[in-house]
Image: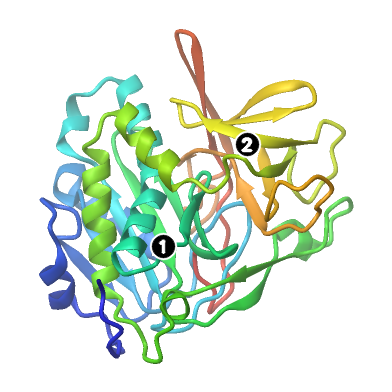
Amino acid sequence: RMAASAASPCFDRVALAACLRTRTTGRRVEYFEETDSTMLRASALLAELGGREAHGALVVADWQTDGVGRRGRNWESGRGQNLLFSMVWSPPALSEASPVDVLAHMVQLNLAVSVAVVRACELVGITSAKVKWPNDVWALDRKLAGSLVDFNGERAAVVGIGINVNEQSADVVVVTDDERRGEAGTWPATVVQRVGVRELLGSAEPVAREPLLAHVCNSLENLMDLSPESFLDQYRRADMLIGRSVRVHHARREVNDPRDYDGTVVDITKQGFLRVRHAGGDATLSGEEIRSRPDSAPGDTREIGIISCPLLHVVSDSDSDRGVPRTCYFELTLSDVIVNIIADSCWSQAPGRNLN
């Protein structure tokens, strides 16, 4: 259990190392008091060292000025308050793996990141943290953490994670690029309430970030050692959506589409897709977007957040000077199943806003 001791204003690598139980994950750390984006820094490290040398390396920052997120949405973070970090993932076993196995590994990675955060939270005494498919973590119906996996299309990925640690709960206005431009047909900006580890623990003092990060690294390495079947069992135990009512959006949650419908989440498939039961039968979601409600009561329209269904980002050719991947769609047929992997456009973040 992590002590609620006073957090250091700067990240302490020694404290992190003391809590690590991994073979490679988190053993190499690059720390910045301030940087543009930990994901961009980690991507540069991957390009410089190659996957074998860079695997498991962390890039940690107290403050980001140009963080990377999904679907043009932002998230605020106070300086030195939270965990903002990225990790290079390219285990040696992938060097000899088939393309099909590499893709399956990356899909498991994308789902495992959130489960690792849930496990880390449990180890510090937070039992309410659950995964909101595919890669958010919520506690008491408020957002605690978020993640993003950028797969380079070959045998490596960069994982970006943001965990609210010491900031108090607040309503955060999440604004998309379309909403900023005032495009017709888009809904107003969404308000998402967040919560932090310190608040959930009821701690009067700031909580140290390093043990929590070590727990994430330890748990992620263990989860990625599991078979797909065993891992999915762990994912289902951490899931918060099964049995909940959701609204499925086929375009974007900001746009009304006649194909949209209400349903109930019934399972996670072995391919990591979400299975939803609705009036027309069962549907398997891979690239849609859903809104979740606090309970399954019919007619309850209160919304607690948005879940973006794309399972994985695939980095394509850059469409800007800062290396932002442009939107692309990747599809691979695996005998009787089609694995859809979506890459959304990343975004240029306003100063002071960070991935979460």
Which quarter of the rendering shows the N terminus?
bottom left
Q: Looking at the image, is 81 positioned above or below residue 154? A: below
Residue at (78%, 21%) from the top-left corner? 280
Q: Looking at the image, is 218 positioned above or below residue 349? A: above
Residue at (47%, 32%) from the top-left corner? 272
Question: Which mark identifies residue 127?
Answer: 1
Location of residue 230 by image quarter: top left
Question: Which mark identifies residue 265?
Answer: 2
Q: x%, y% of residue 125? A: 34, 69
Spatial distance from mark 2 to mark 1, Cα to Cα? 22 Å
Q: x%, y% of residue 236? A: 44, 39
Q: What element carries label 1?
A: loop
Question: Which mark identifies residue 88?
Answer: none
Mark 1 or mark 2, which is nearer the start of the sequence? 1
Q: x%, y% of residue 22? A: 13, 54
**Does residue 267 show up?**
yes
Q: Looking at the image, is 226 positioned above or below residue 46? A: above
Q: Check disc 2: other Cα within 10 Å, few if <14, some if 14-19, many if 20+.
A: many
